[in-house]
Amino acid sequence: MAVNQDSPAPPGDWDRVAASEEFQKLQAARRRFIIPATIAFIVYYFALPVLVGYAPDLMKTPVIGVVNLAYLFALSQFFAAWLIAFLYLREADRFDAMGKHILAQLEARKGGEQS
């Protein structure tokens, strides 16, 4: 039986997959990336208003003409978001491979049970 990625697995299969060690490893790998990346971005994002509020003289420091440190910091947040997105895409390939492996194992077990 071919793996159909458009339809979800039947409920009995989901329970089996969720309980599997491979699925737990996939979930752990996702959490190891998503939680630190989210925390890092939130800290970086809120650093701008905090620095503007508590260190205004530092953030007013001119860098190039009228462009000050606050403007560069704000602009850098776009690059930080793009970097996190790029890193997630790279990790998502690994997550997808792990998910496909889990689905293949499920299909192999189902095939063995039907024989």
Image: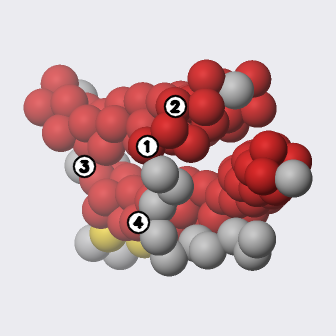
Image-quadrant location for residue 42: top left
Q: Are marks 3 and 4 in contact (CB under 8 Å)?
A: no
Amino acid type assigned to the residue bearing label 2 in the image: Asp
Q: Which residue is mark 4?
A: 78
Query: In x, y percent, where is residue 34?
Result: 52, 38
Q: Are marks 1 and 2 in contact (CB under 8 Å)?
A: yes
Query: In x, y percent, where is residue 3?
Result: 70, 70
Q: Secondary structure at mark 1?
A: helix
Q: Which residue is mark 3?
A: 60
Q: Which residue is mark 2?
A: 15
Name the image quarter holding the N terminus: bottom right
Query: In x, y percent, where is residue 37?
Result: 52, 38
Query: In x, y percent, where is residue 102?
Result: 75, 47
Q: Secondary structure at mark 3?
A: loop
Q: CA distance from mark 4 to mark 1?
A: 41 Å
Mark whose residue sits in front, 3 or 1:
1
Mark whose residue sits in front, 3 or 4:
4
Q: Earlier in the sequence, mark 2 or mark 3?
A: 2
Q: CA distance from mark 1 to mark 2?
A: 6 Å
